[in-house]
Image (spheres, grey):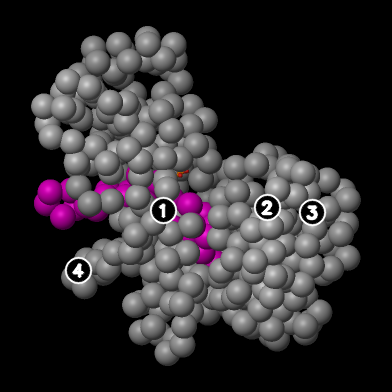
Amino acid sequence: MSPSKISIATLGSHTALQILKGAKDEGFKTVLVCLKSRLSLYGRFKKLIDEIVVVDSFAETASSEVQDKLLSLNAILIPHGSLIEYTDLETIEKRFKVPIFGNKYILRWEADRNLKERLLREAGARTPRVYTNIDEVDGVVIVKLPGAKGGRGYFLASKPSDVRKKLEELKISEDHVFVQEYILGVTSYIHFFYSPLTSELELISMDRRYETNADGLGRLPAHIQVETSPDLSFLVVGNIPIVLRESLLEEVFRIGEGLVEASKKLIPPGFIGPFCIEGAYDGEGKFYVFEFSARIVAGTNIYIYGSPYTWLIYDEPMSMGKRIAREIKRACEEGKLDLLIT
Ligand code: ATP
């Protein structure tokens, strides 16, 4: 099928601008599912958008009206964090008629902590210790609350009694939290692209998240921290670039390859396109993975004009959004679109 017959669609949020720009650069028509309240924002970038489907809420993307409209435009929907946040997974798996770029069945594995742990273990990634028994807490732990979005409400503690005291204050049962070893070090979020067309894993870029107020706390002198004991928050407000020491790249690729293989085994056909491993380097330089995302992440927004790593391979500005569009274009030309969509 000719790429000119296909539209690339996404929701107006998260990484929409680079997805639209990348699609345009590769010669596709573009469709934006846009909240009424954000029309003026995206109107500022109207040259990137051929069609707008206006909705009152992103949950409406699942409605037969929006689905039929997207189908009539021959759209492929690029999923990102906002699709997952505002549409429930069962709906995406069972009710979406429009083809989704990537393996939509992995999205459940990124959302469910137990499935996530299983995939990371299968991949052979080093993960922080998980405490199933709070009495065993013997160092700094991060307590992750059920359904928290973007780390909201997570707290740190270093003794079983402190974990329990805080949970009592929050009126949350011990059975519903995930208590994990806290890795004191440098957080790094590594963005990969796996191409089913070439069976190759590409390192696209990496970032650090700027999280409030965890990243602000270090500016307070210790005595003020003790006096005021501020509640911690990991709400992401932006992303900052990082490059790793070159000697660390080999391990990063090993973890990425491990995840690709594990995903093929557990959720065939496995990862398709962008995914991200999220972790931290401890004081000995060991990388611990505490999360992965099975789709484009917002940290790639730093690199709309390409990253140091894509420059090495492409000799042209290559964003994650453009890389997705390039893959779809190639699949269209080779008659292999089925390998990229679910
Ligand atoms: P998102 O969906 O936005 O990725 P989330 O709710 O899944 O968020 P996490 O990514 O697990 O939350 O954690 C949020 C933040 O908490 C991380 O970006 C990191 O700064 C911190 N964090 C989480 N787990 C650990 C850990 N084990 N050690 C150190 N820091 C951690």
**Residue highlighted by disc 3:** 54
State the SS at label 1. Answer: strand
Quick one: 83 or 215, which is closer to the camera?
A: 215
User: Is any atom of residue 152 visible in this view?
Assistant: yes
The residue carrying pointer 1 sits among few (fewer than 14), some (14 to 19) or many (20 or more) residues within 10 Å by Cα, namely some
Q: Is residue 86 within the magenta segment? A: no
Q: Amino acid at mark 3?
A: Val
**Residue highlighted by disc 1:** 238
Please tell me which residue is depicted at 52% across the width and 54% down the height of the picture.
294
The reply to whether the residue tagged 1 has its Cβ within 8 angstroms of ligand 1 is no
**Residue highlighted by disc 2:** 38
The residue carrying pointer 4 sits among few (fewer than 14), some (14 to 19) or many (20 or more) residues within 10 Å by Cα, namely few
* 233 to the left or right of 176: left
Residues marked 2 and 4 touching at CB (< 8 Å):
no
**Residue highlighted by disc 4:** 245
User: Is any atom of residue 105 visible in this view?
Assistant: no
- First of labels 3, 4 by sequence position: 3
The residue carrying pointer 3 sits among few (fewer than 14), some (14 to 19) or many (20 or more) residues within 10 Å by Cα, namely some
Residue 213: where, in percent of width, then height? 32, 38
